[in-house]
């Protein structure tokens, strides 16, 4: 079912901008109506296309007569406040289309989205895989499961009364159990699916709770998209075998169509998120186009890899992060290189970001390693800085052996500051002369421990006893070393600015 939120996000990539949305953006859209000045009969529809209408005010009047909940009007921004007020009063969402965008292009997109999501009398859309699984199960007289190439459940037929334990566990877990998957791999099932379009019978395995399966690959050209599994105790006969093969071709068409639609949505979303992360003057407008609430956000930078293969796992993480659209997901994501960036509504409390990461780890295969960094809370205009914080937090997590999934900037800002200082030092931006440099050279030439003593004294904030305890020496030894250090270099420990500069130099 098409919802207003998805329509707004997709049309954003075609130059349409949401001016007002008095109703919830979760409202469902089932029909389209196009203005036809030659037809005097009243026409109604959820989405009104004001083709050929001279003014925005007239377009709102016609959309109201058509009982529309959303309308597209082509005009130069900004729209008159009175027109917007009338639309709000009528409960109509107004999408402003720039004059350069053609109606033929927009109408094709709108009709495609609405018709793809339209429900049938059975309550399911014509492209709904669950409806197709029910139809196929009725033809075959057996339960059907449709899976993707990673053995995740895409759809299944309704009746579970005769389902074996393995099927029930697969449906409940939304993916084939690991033990069952290993069994199929040992039997050569996945190798068969990778190379053949012929249905294959997999015999019963009582110890794994499997009565038997007939499986066929779902393929587009040479690319394996998924598979159809039919629960049966013996191989299917010729007619049912043909029905299964035809079903695989139909599922392939559905998956390709869904991929095109999903890729369009992902492209629009990705472009908008990149604009925010790189900095834009209309950050608040972009946030609105993404369907995100007003407030503060955090940027999550995530990398995922399987052994040494980083890019495939990153693409998989991006696909998982963008599965579902609009109100079904809290954040918006983009993939930049091998890093997934997700923009999440999240204030001072970092818990929603950590919960999102935990959910991502759960939906990715077990062999995938996930590392992440979470930036601090930021207003829309501060998101470029938040992205830098997320990147630096991610780098810090990658440098730490073990540990949790993520490093959070709020908790590790001091380490990140030192990282920045070390980067400056490596670029030659730390003085090669001064007390720290002088004492470092003296220690190297004479085997003294002046740098260790200086560090201990500064960390102890000038407390001789505490510094001596850190070094394992007598306080008089520390006092003597400080006198010797003052003879070697211009130490001046009584000047606060000098002490601060030495602390920074020692840190890097």
Image: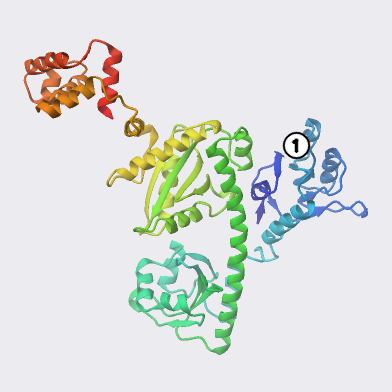
Decide which of 141, 50 is in the foreground and name it.
50
Residue 496 vs 307, above or below: the answer is above
Which residue is at a point 22% across and 12% down the rendered structure image?
A: 492
Q: What residue is shown with label 1?
A: 88
Q: In the image, residue 275 lies at what x, y percent?
A: 57, 40
Q: Quadrant of residue 243?
A: bottom right
Which residue occupies the foreground of this view, 5 or 282?
282
Residue 486: x and y in percent read 16, 14
Is disc 1 placed on a helix, strand or loop? Answer: helix
Residue 19 found in image quarter: top right
Q: Residue 120 location in percent, x, y? A: 69, 64
Q: Is residue 149 left or right of residue 284?
A: left
**Residue 276: quadrant of the picture:** top right
Q: Quadrant of the C terminus?
A: top left
- For the N terminus, give its image quadrant: bottom right
The residue located at (48%, 45%) in the rendering is 341
The percent coordinates of residue 220 (x first, y second) are 56, 72
- Image height of 401 relative to 417, above or below: below
């Amino acid at each position: 079912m098409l919802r207003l939120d998805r329509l707004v996000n997709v049309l954003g990539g075609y130059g349409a901008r949401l001016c007002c949305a008095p109703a919830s953006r979760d409202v469902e859209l089932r029909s389209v109506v196009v203005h036809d000045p030659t037809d005097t009969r009243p026409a109604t529809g959820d989405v009104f296309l004001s083709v050929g209408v001279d003014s925005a005010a007239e377009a709102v009047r016609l959309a109201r007569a058509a009982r529309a909940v959303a309308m597209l009007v082509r005009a130069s921004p900004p729209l008159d406040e009175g027109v917007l007020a009338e639309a709000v009063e009528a409960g109509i969402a107004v999408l402003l289309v720039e004059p350069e965008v053609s109606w033929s292009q927009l109408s094709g997109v709108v009709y495609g989205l609405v018709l793809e999501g339209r429900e049938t009398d059975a309550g399911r859309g014509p492209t709904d895989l669950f409806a197709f699984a029910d139809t196929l199960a009725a033809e075959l007289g057996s339960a059907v499961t449709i899976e993707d190439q990673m053995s995740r459940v895409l759809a299944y037929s309704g009746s579970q009364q005769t389902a074996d334990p393995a099927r029930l566990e697969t449906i409940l877990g939304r993916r084939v159990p690991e033990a069952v998957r290993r069994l199929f791999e040992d039997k050569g099932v996945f190798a068969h699916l990778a190379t053949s379009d012929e249905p294959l019978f997999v015999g019963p395995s009582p110890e794994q709770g499997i009565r038997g399966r007939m499986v066929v690959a779902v393929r587009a050209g040479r690319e394996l998209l998924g598979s159809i599994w039919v629960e049966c105790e013996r191989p299917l006969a010729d007619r049912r075998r043909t029905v299964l093969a035809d079903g695989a071709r139909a599922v392939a068409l559905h998956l390709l169509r869904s991929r095109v639609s999903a890729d369009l949505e992902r492209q629009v979303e990705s472009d908008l998120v990149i604009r925010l992360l790189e900095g834009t003057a209309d950050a608040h407008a972009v946030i609105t186009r993404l369907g995100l609430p007003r407030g503060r956000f955090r940027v999550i930078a995530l990398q995922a890899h399987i052994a040494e293969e980083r890019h495939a796992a990153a693409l998989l993480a991006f696909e998982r992060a963008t599965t579902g659209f609009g109100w079904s997901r809290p954040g918006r994501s983009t993939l930049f290189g091998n890093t997934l960036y997700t923009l999440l509504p999240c204030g001072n409390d970092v818990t929603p970001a950590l919960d999102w990461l935990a959910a991502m780890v759960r939906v990715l295969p077990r062999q995938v390693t996930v590392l992440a960094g979470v930036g601090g809370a930021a207003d829309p205009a501060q998101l470029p800085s938040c992205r830098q914080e997320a990147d630096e937090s991610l780098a810090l997590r990658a440098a730490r052996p073990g540990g949790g999934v993520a490093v959070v900037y709020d908790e590790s800002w001091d380490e990140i500051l030192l990282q920045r200082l070390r980067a400056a030092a490596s670029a030659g931006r730390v003085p090669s002369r001064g007390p720290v440099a002088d004492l470092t050279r003296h220690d190297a030439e004479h085997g003294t421990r002046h740098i260790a003593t200086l560090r201990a004294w500064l960390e102890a904030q000038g407390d001789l006893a505490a510094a001596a305890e850190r070094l394992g020496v007598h306080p008089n030894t520390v006092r003597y070393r400080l006198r010797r250090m003052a003879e070697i270099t211009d130490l001046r420990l009584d000047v606060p600015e000098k002490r601060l500069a030495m602390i920074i130099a020692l840190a890097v």
